[in-house]
C-alpha cells in the first residue's frame, strides 16, 4: 500500500524495548523513515509479543499475544509489519507462518537491503571503522520458517560495502549472546557475550553492529564486567545498524542517542566520520 | 496444555535418530545436566519425569541453532518449551531453575497488568522472588541517568483484551 506521497505504508511494531531501555534504537529508526521512503504506522494499541518468556511457560498465551497484534495489523488494512526488535520479529514471523496469517513480517536488515539504492543516493559520510556485523540468533533462525542463510548471513556486510565501509569476516556472527539469561544466569551471558567480543577484537573489529535490543544489553551494558573477565579486551562500542546508517546519511550524532550506550564512542569518533564525496 | 501439543512433541521426538548435531552446536550445553540429544532420547523412551526435573530444559536459550541444523528437522527448542511448561504445571522443576521460572513469571505478570512489559515492576518482583536485592543496582542507576529506564509504564488502552488471553490460557 502507498500513501498519497508515494511512500510505502507499513505497520510498525516497536515492541516494549524500543519504548523503554532501547529508546536509542527507536530514535535511530525514526531518523531513517524518510530516506527509506516508508511511512511507519504504529499498530494500534499493540501489546507485548510475549518475547522469550511466554513461549517458555505458556504456549497458548505466546501464540494468542502475537495473534492479537496480527489481527490489529489486519484491521488497519495493512499486510506488512516492520519489527526492528529481533525477538519481536522472530515471534511475529513464526506465529504468522504457523497460522497462515497472510502477513509479511520484515526486520531491519531486510528493510534496509530492499531500499539500499535510496540510502546510497542519500549518503554523505562514511565511518572509517572496521565493523563486526553481529546478527545473533533470531533474525535468521529457525531455518525451517525463515528459509534463508543462517550460518553465514551477509545482508549487513553487503549494506556496509555498498556504503563504502569495511566489515570483518568472523565465525561468531550468529552465535548466541546469552539472551534473557542476562538477569537470572548472568554468568552465561559473561561467557557467551565475552567469546563474541573477544573474537571480534581479535579479528580487528573497532565496533560491533547489532539489530537486537537484548543483544545490545548483553554486549554493551554488560561489557564492563566482561572486560574484567577478559583481560586485554579493549572497549568495543556497540551500534545499532540504524544508527550507522543514520550517521551515513548525515543525521548529526547529537540527534541520535549515542550517549545512552554504556560503552562510549571512541575519542576520535568525529574524525572517523568522513565525507564520502571526495 | 492442549491436546495439540501432546501430539506434536511426541511427533517431534520420534523423528530423531541421535546423530548428536544439536548437542555439538549448542551454546549452552556446558550448563546442562542432560545434553539436548539425551533430552530427546528420554522423551522417546517415555522417561519424561526425568526430563521434567532436569536443568537442561531451562538452560535452553531458544537460539534455534539445533532446529536449523537438524537433518530430521526436530523442533527441539519447541520441545524444550513444552517440557518447561509441563514442568511448571506439575511443579517438578529443578531447584536451580527457580530463578529462571521467577523471571518468566515476573515478566508475564507485568504484561498481564499493563499489556506491555514494564522493567521497573518486573525487576522489583524478580528481586522479591529471588531475594537478590543488590544485583545490577548500579546498572539501574546508570540507565536512569542515560534516560533508558522509563519510570512510568506504557499501558495498553484495551487491557481487558490482553488479560482475557491470560485467563483463557490458564
Image (cartoon, rainbow, N blue to C red):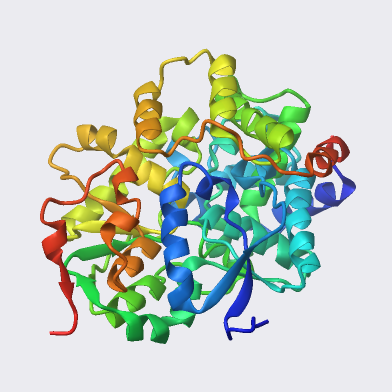
Q: Is residue B123 above or below residue A264?
A: above
Quadrant assignment for the N terminus of chain A: bottom right
Q: Quadrant of residue B155?
A: top right
Vertical position of residue B40 compared to residue A273: above or below? above
Q: In terms of depth relative to the viewer, which is nearer, B120 or A157?
A: B120
Along the horizontal axis of the image, is B158 left or right of A6?
right
Residue A199 in percent (x, y) is at 24, 53
Q: Quadrant of the C terminus of chain A?
A: bottom left
The residue at the point 52 percent across, 57 percent down is A86
Q: Nearer the viewer, residue A38 or A74?
A: A38
State the residue in front, B7 or B16: B7
The quarter of the displayed image where residue A246 is located: bottom left
The residue at 41%/71% (across/down) is A153
- Percent position of residue A104, x then y: 66, 73
Left or right of A242 on screen, residue B157: right
**Residue at 40% across / 55% down in the picture?**
A175
The spot of residue A42 in percent (x, y) is 64, 60
Q: Residue furthest front?
A: A4
Q: What is the x, y in percent for residue B170?
A: 84, 34
Query: Which of these two is toward me, A106 or A259?
Result: A259
Q: Quadrant of residue A5?
A: bottom right
Look at 46% across and 35% down and name the residue there.
B149
Amino acid at each position: 500500500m502507498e500513501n498519497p506521497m508515494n511512500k510505502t505504508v507499513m505497520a510498525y511494531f516497536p515492541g516494549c524495548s524500543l519504548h523503554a531501555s532501547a529508546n536509542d534504537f527507536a530514535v535511530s529508526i525514526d531518523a531513517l523513515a524518510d530516506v527509506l521512503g516508508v511511512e511507519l504506522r504504529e499498530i494500534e494499541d499493540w501489546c507485548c509479543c510475549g518475547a522469550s518468556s511466554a513461549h517458555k511457560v505458556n504456549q497458548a498465551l505466546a501464540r494468542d499475544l502475537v495473534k492479537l497484534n496480527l489481527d490489529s495489523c489486519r484491521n488497519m488494512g495493512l499486510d506488512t509489519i516492520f519489527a526492528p526488535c529481533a525477538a519481536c520479529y522472530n515471534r511475529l514471523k513464526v506465529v504468522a507462518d504457523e497460522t497462515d496469517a497472510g502477513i509479511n513480517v520484515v526486520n531491519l536488515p531486510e528493510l534496509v537491503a530492499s531500499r539500499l539504492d535510496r540510502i546510497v543516493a542519500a549518503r554523505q559520510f562514511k565511518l572509517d571503522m572496521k565493523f563486526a556485523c553481529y546478527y545473533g540468533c533470531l533474525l535468521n533462525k529457525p531455518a525451517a520458517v525463515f528459509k534463508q542463510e543462517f550460518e553465514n548471513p551477509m545482508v549487513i556486510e553487503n549494506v556496509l560495502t555498498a556504503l563504502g565501509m569495511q566489515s570483518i569476516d568472523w565465525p561468531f556472527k550468529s552465535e548466541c549472546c546469552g539472551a534473557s539469561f542476562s538477569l537470572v544466569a548472568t554468568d552465561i551471558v559473561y561467557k557467551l557475550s565475552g567469546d563474541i567480543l573477544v573474537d571480534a577484537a581479535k579479528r580487528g573489529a573497532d565496533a560491533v553492529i547489532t539489530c537486537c535490543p537484548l543483544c545490545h544489553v548483553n554486549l554493551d551494558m554488560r561489557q564492563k564486567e566482561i572486560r574484567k573477565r577478559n583481560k586485554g579486551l579493549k572497549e568495543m562500542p556497540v551500534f545499532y545498524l540504524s544508527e550507522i546508517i543514520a550517521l551515513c546519511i548525515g543525521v548529526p550524532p547529537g540527534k541520535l542517542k549515542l550517549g545512552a550506550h554504556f560503552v562510549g564512542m571512541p575519542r576520535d569518533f568525529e574524525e572517523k566520520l568522513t565525507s564520502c564525496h571526495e | 496444555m492442549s491436546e495439540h501439543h501432546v501430539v506434536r512433541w511426541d511427533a517431534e521426538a520420534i523423528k530423531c535418530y541421535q546423530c548428536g548435531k544439536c548437542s555439538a552446536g549448542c551454546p549452552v550445553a556446558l550448563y546442562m545436566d542432560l545434553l539436548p540429544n539425551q533430552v530427546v532420547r528420554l522423551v522417546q523412551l517415555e522417561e519424561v519425569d526425568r526430563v521434567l526435573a532436569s536443568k537442561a530444559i531451562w538452560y535452553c536459550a531458544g537460539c534455534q541453532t539445533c532446529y536449523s541444523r537438524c537433518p530430521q528437522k526436530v523442533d527441539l527448542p519447541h520441545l524444550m518449551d513444552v517440557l518447561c511448561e509441563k514442568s511448571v504445571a506439575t511443579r517438578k522443576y529443578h531447584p536451580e531453575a527457580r530463578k529462571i521460572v521467577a523471571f518468566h513469571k515476573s515478566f508475564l505478570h507485568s504484561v498481564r497488568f499493563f499489556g506491555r512489559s514494564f522493567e521497573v515492576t518486573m525487576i522489583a518482583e524478580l528481586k522479591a522472588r529471588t531475594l537478590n536485592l543488590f544485583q545490577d543496582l548500579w546498572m539501574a542507576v546508570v540507565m536512569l541517568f542515560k534516560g533508558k529506564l522509563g519510570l512510568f509504564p506504557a499501558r495498553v488502552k484495551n487491557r481487558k483484551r490482553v488479560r482475557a488471553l491470560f485467563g483463557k490460557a490458564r
